[in-house]
């Protein structure tokens, strides 16, 4: 059950999207989001749908995985749609007592749903096609200039990659301890809220103990390999900026430019 | 007689429908007779851990079924919960599951979940502590400040205290020093002698398996490769080596001697058997 949690889980693969440089993909996502928020009308929305579809096709990520990723935000999507449907002024279509659904409201709701869906699908493609390590490396380099004003970019990136690295480990550990306590008759699923909160104690205590032990071991392992922060540190997996990355950025910029032009002509 | 546990066409698939889909076990048919001490052998990923988690209903079979004393353990939630107390499962590295403030309360966790009266819980805690050789003064200490070997014995006591009809131990000696290993194994054999429980022991150590088990089941690639007495199983030396498993040291030495032309019988897997066989062969050769 815990295994089903996806936190932008990485899908190993060998598509063009997988081979693009992490920095390139990060910039592309920024361009994509910018384009998405610039799009205002039927024409540009249709265009963005095509672009999103093309991105999914290129990344070779199964559509099912993307749909599954959308599930957790379903509530927000529905809520936004409802709010827009009922609270937009315009020509009434249906009257439900005090509430009126307007034509403008329906259109706006449809646009908002599309925008949020595409926003999430697009950003999920980034985490689906990029390993967490490459992603944090890419971020560290892109935010590198901030080091000049004493922002601890490296430390933040290191913390992030460690946190990402340990999420699956902790989930696995939780699963194991849960099984072990269930084998001794612990019951995590039934009872009142207070009973359930109490039932979590046999799970949380060992989990914290092992998390601290792990953190301690990791710190020792890092120190014994002379880790001392950013200065003079090299990477095992270097990021390589290739011609295809430049090409991809140009393509992304072209999409953004196209949306801008469309907006200018009211499409 | 109905076997205490019967697995029928057991199959389990992890992460079905994702790129990480993995068939862990398939076509497992196994009868476990009451009172047996069974050694389960197999290398990492052979499906043995998945298999034992089916025995008390922690994992549900993808297809097939597990029967405890004739009843399907997945037939109802209550049945599954009841089987949890009848089939005591000690996980690998069980010391990481300790959580209570005192050793006593940690051992009492299982019996308390069984909703037993206070006096009964108390009796069982003392009994379980005695089985694993925990001294009285340890019971009021915090489990977290004790040594690794002691923690492991506490965790095993926590399961024994439920008085399960069948005890399943997943590599109870992993990571312990030789003295700790011997002690745990002695605890297990003593426990069996006194209670007559059925015991399933998952182990990597062929020597341990050869020494204490009545029956060995070898898992390989999610299926049962061999099933029989230690003598039968270890007679397949070549096949065992081919699937990446060891044979007991005594069996290895016997095989090396056979390769050099010493006439030794087939079923040799404990040091004592080897000693007797070598003596017999030596006397035989001397007589010629």
Image: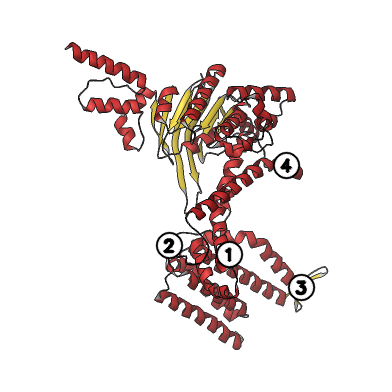
Q: Do labels 3 and 4 share a chain?
A: yes
Query: Which label number is shown at residue A156?
Result: 1
CB contact under 8 Å: marks 3 and 2: no
Q: Distance between the residues labelled 4 and 2?
A: 45 Å
Q: Distance between the residues labelled 1 and 3?
A: 42 Å
Q: Distance between the residues labelled 4 and 1?
A: 35 Å
Question: Which residue is disc 2 drawn over?
Answer: A236
Q: Distance between the residues labelled 3 and 4?
A: 43 Å
Question: Which residue is disc 4 drawn over?
Answer: A198
CB contact under 8 Å: marks 4 and 2: no
Q: How far apart are marks 3 and 2 (CA)?
A: 54 Å
In the image, A94 versus A240, the foreground residue is A240
Q: Earlier in the sequence, mark 3 or mark 2?
A: 3
Label 2 neighbour load within 10 Å: few <14, some 14-19, many 20+: few
Query: Which label number is shown at residue B218?
Result: none
Q: Are marks 4 and 2 on the same chain?
A: yes
- Residue B164 is situated, as x and y percent measured from the top left of the image, at 59, 25
Q: Which of marks 1 and 2 is nearer the N terminus?
A: 1
What chain does badge 3 belong to? Answer: A
Q: Is residue B205 left or right of residue B255?
A: right
Question: Which residue is disc 3 drawn over?
Answer: A87
């Amino acid at each position: 059950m815990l295994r089903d949690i996806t936190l932008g889980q990485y899908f190993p693969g060998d598509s063009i999207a997988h081979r693009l440089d992490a920095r390139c993909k990060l910039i592309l996502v920024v361009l994509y989001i910018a384009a998405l928020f610039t799009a205002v009308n039927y024409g540009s929305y249709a265009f963005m749908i095509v672009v999103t579809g093309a991105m999914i096709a290129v990344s070779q990520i199964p559509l099912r995985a993307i749909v599954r990723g959308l599930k957790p935000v379903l509530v927000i999507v529905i809520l936004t749609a409802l709010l827009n449907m009922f609270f937009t002024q315009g020509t009434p279509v249906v009257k439900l007592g005090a509430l009126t659904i307007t034509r403008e409201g329906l259109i706006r709701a449809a646009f908002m749903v599309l925008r949020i869906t595409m926003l999430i699908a697009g950003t999920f493609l980034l985490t689906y096609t990029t390993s967490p390590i490459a992603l944090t490396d890419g971020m560290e380099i892109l935010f590198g200039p901030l080091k000049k004003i004493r922002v601890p970019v490296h430390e933040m990136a290191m913390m992030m990659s460690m946190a990402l690295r340990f999420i699956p480990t902790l989930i696995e550990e939780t699963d194991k301890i849960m099984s072990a306590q269930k084998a001794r008759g612990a019951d995590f699923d039934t009872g009142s809220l207070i009973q359930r909160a109490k039932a979590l104690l046999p799970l949380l205590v060992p989990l914290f103990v092992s998390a601290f032990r792990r953190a301690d071991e990791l710190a020792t392992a890092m120190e014994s390999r002379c880790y001392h922060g950013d200065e003079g540190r090299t990477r095992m997996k270097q990021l390589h900026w290739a011609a295809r990355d430049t090409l991809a950025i140009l393509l992304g910029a072209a999409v953004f430019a196209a949306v801008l032009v469309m907006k200018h002509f009211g499409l | 007689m109905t076997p205490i546990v019967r697995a029928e066409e057991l199959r389990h698939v992890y992460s079905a429908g994702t790129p990480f889909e993995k068939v862990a076990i398939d076509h497992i048919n196994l009868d476990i007779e009451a009172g047996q001490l069974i050694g389960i052998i197999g290398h990492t990923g052979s499906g043995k851990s998945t298999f034992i988690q089916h025995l008390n209903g922690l994992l549900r079979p993808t297809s097939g079924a597990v029967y405890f004393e004739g009843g399907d353990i997945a037939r109802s939630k209550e049945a599954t919960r009841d089987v949890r107390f009848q089939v005591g499962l000690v996980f690998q590295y069980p010391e990481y599951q300790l959580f209570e403030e005192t050793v006593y309360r940690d051992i009492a966790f299982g019996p308390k979940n069984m909703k037993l009266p206070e006096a009964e819980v108390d009796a069982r805690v003392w009994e379980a502590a005695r089985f694993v050789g925990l001294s009285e003064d340890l019971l009021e200490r915090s489990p977290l400040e004790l040594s690794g070997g002691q923690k492991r014995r506490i965790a095993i006591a926590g399961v024994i205290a439920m008085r399960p009809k069948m005890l399943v131990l997943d590599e109870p000696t992993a990571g312990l020093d030789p003295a700790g290993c011997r002690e745990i194994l002695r605890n297990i054999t003593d426990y069996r002698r006194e209670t007559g429980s059925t015991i399933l022991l998952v182990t990597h150590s062929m020597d341990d398996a050869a020494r204490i088990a009545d029956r060995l089941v070898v898992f390989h690639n999610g299926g049962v490769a061999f099933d029989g007495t230690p003598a039968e199983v270890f007679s397949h030396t070549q096949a065992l080596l081919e699937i990446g498993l060891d044979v007991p040291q005594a069996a290895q030495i016997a095989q090396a001697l056979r390769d050099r032309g010493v006439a030794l019988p087939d079923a040799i897997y404990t040091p004592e058997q080897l000693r007797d066989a070598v003596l017999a062969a030596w006397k035989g050769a001397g007589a010629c």
